[in-house]
Amino acid sequence: MNICALFGGPHKKGNTAALLEKVLDGARSAGHETRRIDVTGMDIRPCKGCMGCKKPKAEGCVQRDDMGQVLDAVKSADVLILASPMYWWNLAGPLKNVVDRFFSLPFNAKVEQSAFAGKKLMLVMTSGQPAVSDGREGLELILAKMCEFTGMTWLGTVTTGTGGTPLAEQSDALKAARDAGATL
Ligand SMILES: Cc1cc2nc3c(=O)[nH]c(=O)nc-3n(C[C@H](O)[C@H](O)[C@H](O)COP(=O)(O)O)c2cc1C
């Protein structure tokens, strides 16, 4: 399978990137193709809400920025991974902008051929609170709803909270992340 990870954190070698790399490492060990796109720092502007992408003769989003290459990668992926540090119980801003810009693809599986139909969606997230009490259930509910609406399968979250313990010392969490990737 073709696995596309959209990484939205500010630290290329931080907790979230480390957890994501374990997932991707596991996926590669199972023979899957992986691609990681670091969206922070790319020229990806917020959705303008102009609805230009929904006009009868529209050719996608009216904004010509780096989102075009992200959408191409999304379209060809079998599995999408959203990887983000938890920021206020949510995705970090750059990744939220990317998700908003998914709007320019056909997405409503009930009324059209959704560009997302048949794909799988996974969240990779780290938090400052221990994962057991980090409160991510609101975000998981949103992503599960997004999957239902677009025709994707929600795979759930690979996560760990640091709770003050550096991720590098959390061997159980790192192993669980690699196993999750290997069983995609
Ligand atoms: C702006 C901001 C908001 C945060 N919000 C939360 C939060 O809501 N819950 C939480 O447990 N940790 C929160 N954190 C902590 C980070 O999620 C945590 O340190 C994470 O592991 C950082 O990942 P990174 O090393 O990939 O940047 C926040 C940190 C920042 C900078």
Image (spheres, rainbow, N blue to C red):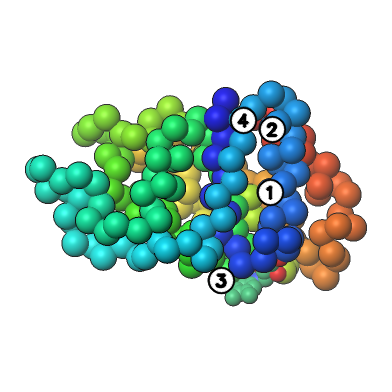
In the rendered view of the protein, which quadrant contains the N terminus? top right
Residue under numbered circle 2: 27
How far, Cα to Cα, is label 1 from label 3? 20 Å
Contact, mark 1 vs mark 2 (Cβ under 8 Å):
no
Mark 4 vs mark 1: in front = 4
Viewer-side label of 2, 4: 4
Q: Amino acid at mark 4?
A: Glu
Q: Considering the numbered disc 3 on the image, is that residue within a helix, a strand or a loop?
A: loop
Q: Tag on residue 88?
A: 3
Q: Which residue is mark 1?
A: 20
Which disc number belongs to residue 76? none
Mark 2–mark 4 CB contact (< 8 Å) = no
Residue drawn 81% across the image and 47% down it = 174
Q: Is residue 3 above or below residue 99?
A: above
Give left or right: position of 72 versus 111: right
Cβ of disc 2 within 8 Å of ligand 1? no
Q: Find ligand 1 in the image and state its quadrant.
A: bottom right
For marks 3 and 2 on the same chain, the one whose residue lies earlier in the sequence: 2
In the visual, does 182 lie left or right of 106?
A: right
x 73%, y 61%: residue: 13
Q: Amino acid at mark 2?
A: Ala
